[in-house]
Amino acid sequence: MPPVFVGWLSPAVAPMLAALTGLAVTARAAEPLASFSTEKEAQGHCPGGLVVWLDRATKVYYFRGQQKYGSTQSGGYVCRDEAKRTGIKESRSSQ
């Protein structure tokens, strides 16, 4: 809402609106997800973590043993914990 309309709001609402506007300016962009062309590179990035295959086109990740693991055209190996943190979903299929 433009500042010109703040005068129309109750005195209690105007400071809250100003605070929310400031939050939008200071919000940090999410860090990009590190993706690797080999499992070994990904494992080096997330030692002790589980490496999964991310299909970037569908934003779904697959586990080793599943049919699409390592085989989609627009994919790469990533750390599962990092993928989950960025909102990428696990494959629902067991194959």
Image (tube, rainbow, N blue to C red):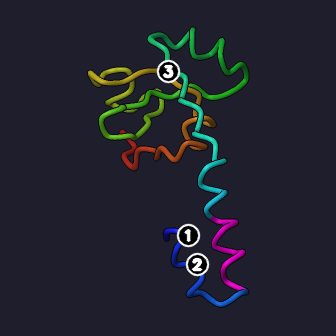
Q: Does the magenta segment cover residue 50?
A: no
Label 1–label 2 contact, CB within 8 A: yes
Q: Amino acid at mark 1?
A: Pro
Front-most of residues 66 and 78: 78
User: Residue 92, image x and y in percent?
Assistant: 40, 50
Q: Secondary structure at mark 3?
A: loop
Horizontally, is 73 left or right of 45 in the view? left
Residue 6 got which mark? 2
Front-most of residues 12 and 52: 12
Q: Residues within 10 Å of mark 1 (few under 14, many from 20)?
A: few
The residue at which mark 1 appears reads as: 3
Q: Image height check: is 20 above or below 46? A: below
Front-most of residues 31 and 37: 31
Label 2–label 3 contact, CB within 8 A: no
The residue at which mark 3 appears reads as: 35
Q: Nearer the viewer, mark 2 or mark 3?
A: 2
Q: Amino acid at mark 3?
A: Ser
Horizontally, is 6 left or right of 70 in the view? right
Closer to the chain start, of discs 3 and 1, is: 1
Splitting the image into 4 quarters, where does residue 54 fall?
top left
Q: Nearer the viewer, mark 3 or mark 1?
A: 1
The magenta stretch is 12-20
